[in-house]
């Protein structure tokens, strides 16, 4: 459960923005979307490897 303490004089918009940021960090929506459709382990592993290769390429470009 996410608890947001609203400070005195704080607008509702700012409090809602803080709530959304905390909610995003929990990863609930990401997990919900991933559970909507089953993905085989091999496909999951393949996407992880592709992502790792992509990140490694970005790091090498930045190091040049």
Image: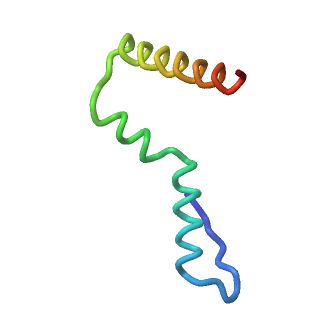
Horizontal side, residue 8 vs residue 41: left or right: right
Q: Between residues 1 and 40, which one lies in front from this camera angle?
A: 40
Tell me where residue 63 sits by quadrant.
Answer: top right
Q: Is residue 26 above or below residue 3?
A: above
Q: In percent of the image, x 49 and y 22: which residue is there? A: 51
Q: Residue furthest top?
A: 42
Please report the residue visible at 69 percent of the width from the left and 80 percent of the height from the top: 7
Q: Nearer the viewer, residue 52 or 7?
A: 52
Image coordinates for residue 12, horizontal then vertical, percent = 54, 81
Q: Residue furthest left?
A: 37
| Quadrant of the image containing the C terminus | top right
- Residue 19: quarter of image: bottom right
Residue lying at 55% horizontally and 57% vertically, measured from the top left: 1
Image-based side of 45 in relation to 16, left or right: left
Q: How is the image coloured?
A: rainbow
- Residue 15: x %, y % from top left: 58, 74
Where 35 sits versus 3, above or below?
A: above
Identify whether 43 is placed above or below 19. Answer: above
Q: Residue furthest front?
A: 64
**Residue at the image point whose x is 35% and y is 40% from the top:** 33
Q: Residue 11: image x %, image y %?
A: 59, 84
Residue that lies at the very extreme toward the bottom in this rendered image: 9
**Residue 37: x percent and y percent?**
27, 31
Number of numbered tags placed on the structure image: 0
């Amino acid at each position: 459960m996410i608890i947001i303490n609203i400070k005195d004089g704080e607008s509702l918009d700012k409090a809602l923005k803080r709530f959304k940021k905390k909610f995003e960090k929990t990863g609930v929506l990401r997990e919900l979307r991933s559970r909507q459709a089953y993905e085989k382990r091999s496909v999951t592993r393949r996407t992880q490897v592709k992502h790792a290769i992509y990140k490694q390429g970005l790091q090498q470009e930045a190091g040049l």
